[in-house]
Image (cartoon, rainbow, N blue to C red):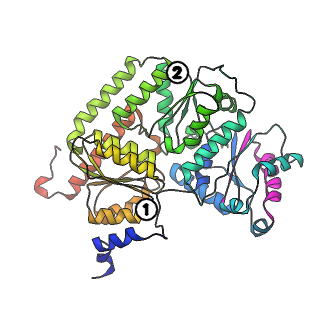
Amino acid sequence: MNTAEWINTVEYKELNFARKALVVNPTKACQPLGAFFCASGFEGTLPYEHGSQGCTAYFRNNLARHYREPFPAVSDSMTEDAAVFGGRANMIEGLKNANDLYKPKMIAMCTSCMAEVIGDDLKAFISNARDAGSIPASLPVAPAHTPSFIGSHITGYDNMLLAIVKTLSEGKYKDGDRNGKLNVIPGFDAHIENIREVKRYMSMMGVPVTVLADNTETFDSPLSGHYEMYHGGTTLAEAGDSVNAIGTISMQAYASAKTVKEFGAEYGQKTAEFNYPMGIAAFDSFLMKVSEMTGMPIPASITDERGRALDAATDAHQYFHGKRFSMFGDPDVMLGLARFIMEMGGEPVHIVSTNGTKKWEREMQALLASSPYGSSGTAYPGKDLWHLRSLLVTEPVDMLIGDSHGKYAAKDAGIPLVRIGFPITDRVNLHRYATLGYKGTMNLITWITNAFLDELDRTCDDAHFELLR
């Protein structure tokens, strides 16, 4: 038996799942990428990595390829001498250059592995830079420790968001004096149109909202003919005042756990966390929670949108019913996607999340067990795309859902791939379409149903090449 055939066997799958020391194509990225993504959502903010230039180039490249937009970020270019003597001198010079050249309103600083292994003290070094005159006392610098050897991009997002909120809100908390606004944390959401959709729903309900962080314009700005470096939509004043909000809702619990805890424990806010509320029932729960926390009713205009999503689901349910799905990605997105698939009558079978935890596994298995039809689905925390390939070729499904990296396994398994998540580098404009809300639900139904119908047209014989499907 040759190798190409052997890797499709159950024997190979068992050996593949037994490996411990090797990761092949994980479904996650490094912490600083998430920190950069978060920082880009704030007004006039320059993402800055205390570390090597190559790391920064890697994160910029990944974000630019997914969104097809330029992404500005800098590093203080630590090299071999910094590995021996520490990066203090690099930071003092780097902060001066960043401020002089790019005139940011805030610098959001994260760390690479090199700085973390050395043990550089960010707060002390920033203070040294101010004492040396590299940056003015009035320029906020938010420091977040983001070692890539633990956690993932969602951890980095959370660490940076918490650092920004704490930096900008220093001395601004008014105990018990609420500003009447609701904080919404999108989390690491590759489909940034979701932020616009959430703001639209809040406007329809009459709810004043602060989005932490709003990077819609960063990654989807108009082509105006001239370059603007900063597009972050959350003002520094809004972010600083967020500690006085009436409450905080997170759309991705695993991507904002520390920040949400801080809003509740330190600032006495009502908080709520969701796992990427895809589909009708989950988004119903989100809107009802908003109504509960703010006292604002859900208007008829939103109810009408919900009705259209229900109509779309009714039109397409027969194409989902009984279909077997495999999916991979971030833990929140996997919970939201599995819930949506079950709502449509499909069966999630293999759910892989390299940055999923044991807690996530328990939540996912409980969700799968709640299906009235029964489920043979399994959650795989800590596994990678090579594990997933073994599952696809030995326990076949009808469709794979995930980012562009899944195309190779999908091709080997002979099934369609619907692209959701980060990064999507082999298709265009998908980040400009919502996956949340009732319009997002209709998008998901349309993409998945039409992928099945395209596959049916591609694979059927001439006698079954029908005009009506």
Q: Which mark is residue 166?
A: none
State the residue in front, 402 or 315.
Answer: 402
Up the image or down, 409 lies above or below 283; here it is: below
- Image coordinates of residue 16 in percent, x first then y, are 38, 70
Residue at the outermost right position: 132
- Taking the image as shown, residue 358 lies to the left or right of residue 7, namely right
- Residue to which mark 2 is pinned: 207
- Residue to which mark 1 is pinned: 384
Q: Nearer the viewer, mark 2 or mark 1?
A: 1
Marks 2 and 1, how far apart in space?
41 Å
Magenta stretch bounds: 85-112
Is residue 94 one of those drawn in magenta? yes
Looking at the figure, which quarter contains the N terminus?
Answer: bottom left
Q: Amino acid at mark 2?
A: Val
Q: Is residue 310 visible?
A: yes
Q: Residue drawn at (82%, 55%), measured in percent from left and top? A: 93
Is residue 25 one of those drawn in magenta? no
Dot 1 falls on a residue whose secondary structure is loop
